[in-house]
Image (cartoon, rainbow, N blue to C red):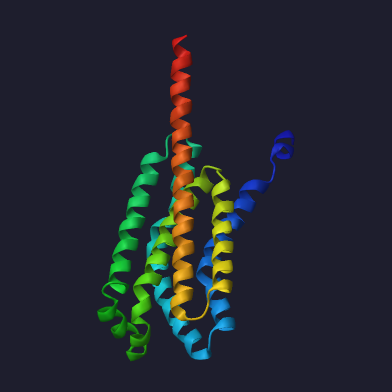
Amino acid sequence: KGNIHAIKFPKSFFSASLLTILSTSAFLSVDLILVKHYLSAIQAGQYALIGLIGKIVFYFGSLVNNLMMTFVSRDEGANRSSDKTFNRLLLATITLTGLVFVVVGPLGHIVTPILFGEKVYTILPFISEYALAIAFITITQALLLYHLAKHHYVFSVTSLISVCVMIIAIILHHASVREVVNDVLFASILNFSLIVSLHVLYRQRRWIKSNIRDLLDVF
């Protein structure tokens, strides 16, 4: 009975999980909603097709990300380092995301007309840029899930802030499909840069703590 009462609902983890899901979903959908409001019906249709191609990059790249929480949490629960697991899954995510990006981006002028027909020719100038933005979002998601499993919640909040930056950028700059694609790319690079910076800081903090502990052990 005492143990049952001792179990508490993990509010912080639950909130951070919602923020992670919200930020990723917003990166993939909010721009489509805003485009329908700001651009013409023809341009909105073109952007919707760009978004569909971008989702191909995300969904294929995320196949490995779906394993991140499971395996990192397993390592953490067993009180062993999750670094090797993270590095392997991150490398797999980068590789898979990179391959799909190359197929629909740089090689998009060959592949996308086969998949979507002649209507894709009007958006070819934007596909590589948008696919790159989604590639950044996909790789960033791997980092978010890793730190969520380690209960580092600042990453989820930071990603949501980047989404807000994207929304503001689109509201301010939406004269054409090109401008909106640039806004999404800017926000995705910002998000990636902030999350990677935080990741490096957390790694350095752990390294510093380890060395201080070793120094104290000397005395």
Q: Position of residue 29 (x, y in %)?
A: 53, 72
Determine the residue positioned at 48% across, 69% down: 183
49 versus 65 height, above or below: below
Depth check: 204 or 66 in front?
204
Taking the image as drawn, is residue 59 in sight?
yes
Determine the residue positioned at 46% across, 44% down: 199
Going by the image, does 192 lie left or right of 163? left
Taking the image as drawn, is residue 69 in sight?
no
Going by the image, does 68 lie left or right of 125? right
> Disc count in the image?
0
Q: Position of residue 133 (x, y in %)?
A: 41, 66
Quarter occupied by the N terminus: top right
Q: Position of residue 216 (x, y in %)?
A: 48, 15
Depth check: 3 or 156 in front?
156
Determine the residue positioned at 71% across, 39% down: 4
Depth check: 146 or 213 in front?
213
Determine the residue positioned at 44% across, 59% down: 189
Q: Position of residue 209 (x, y in %)?
A: 48, 27
